[in-house]
Amino acid sequence: MQRDKRLLPRISVLIALPLAFVSLIPSLLLGYYLYDRQQSTRDVAEDNRKAIERADDAIEQIRALTVAVSAALQGRDEGLADAVSQQCRENEVQDAIIVSVLRTTGTNPEVELPPEVRQDFRDAIVALEPKGEEPCPLRPGIEP
């Protein structure tokens, strides 16, 4: 009996310690794996947040660029429309002056012109001022 009392703690230690290590080591490894996985998930989430912030900044820059380019294009279009309208008006004034000179010269009885030249004057007048000629284009919002 005495001997059993002394052997019992030794046997307990011999069984308990390996059993504890057998169960503790996988538990520690599993715990470390889960901790590392959670930490990796946090790192990925933080990386994703930073990427989203950078994407948001890029989107804002693109929006600002789009607005600037749109304004520049609109200004260019308005400038072109003004130039076309101005050129058309100047051409119409020039046509009106030439037609006036042709009519005055062609209908003046004091000026003796051959019939072919008078016909050429009439053809030139018709060419410069055709029937149904479209008026000069105006910029939107401008009344003639």
Image (spheres, helix red, strand yellow):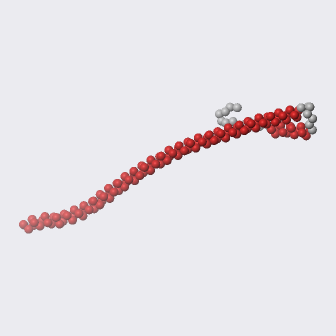
Frontmost residue, 33 versus 74:
74
Location of the C terminus by quadrant is top right
Occupied quadrant, residue 12: bottom left
Specify the farthest residue to the left: 2
Pick the quarter of the image with the N terminus: bottom left
Inspect this view and state whether residue 57 appears.
yes
Position of 7 with respect to 63 (left or right) is left
Figure disc tally = 0
Query: Residue 22 vs residue 56: left or right?
Result: left
Q: Is residue 53 above or below residue 142?
A: below
> Based on the displayed image, in which of its 4 quarters is residue 11 positioned?
bottom left
Q: Say if 74 sits above or below 49 in the image.
A: above
Percent position of residue 6, x then y: 10, 66
- In the rendered view, tell whether residue 47 sits above or below residue 83: below
Task: Choose between 43 and 2: the one closer to the eye.
Answer: 43
Where is residue 129? Give x, y as percent.
80, 37
Give the residue drawn at x 74%, y 36%.
Answer: 90
The image quarter containing residue 13 is bottom left
Q: Is residue 11 left or right of residue 50?
A: left
Left or right of 29, for residue 65: right
**Which residue lies at the image location 26% right of the left edge and 62% below the top edge?**
25
Q: What residue is rendered at 92% in x and 38% in y?
A: 114
Q: Would residue 137 be visible to someone looking at this image?
A: no
Residue 102 image offset from top left, x and y in percent: 85, 35
Q: Nearer the viewer, residue 13 or 53?
A: 53
Whole-percent x and y of residue 84? 70, 39
Residue under the point 49% across and 47% down = 58
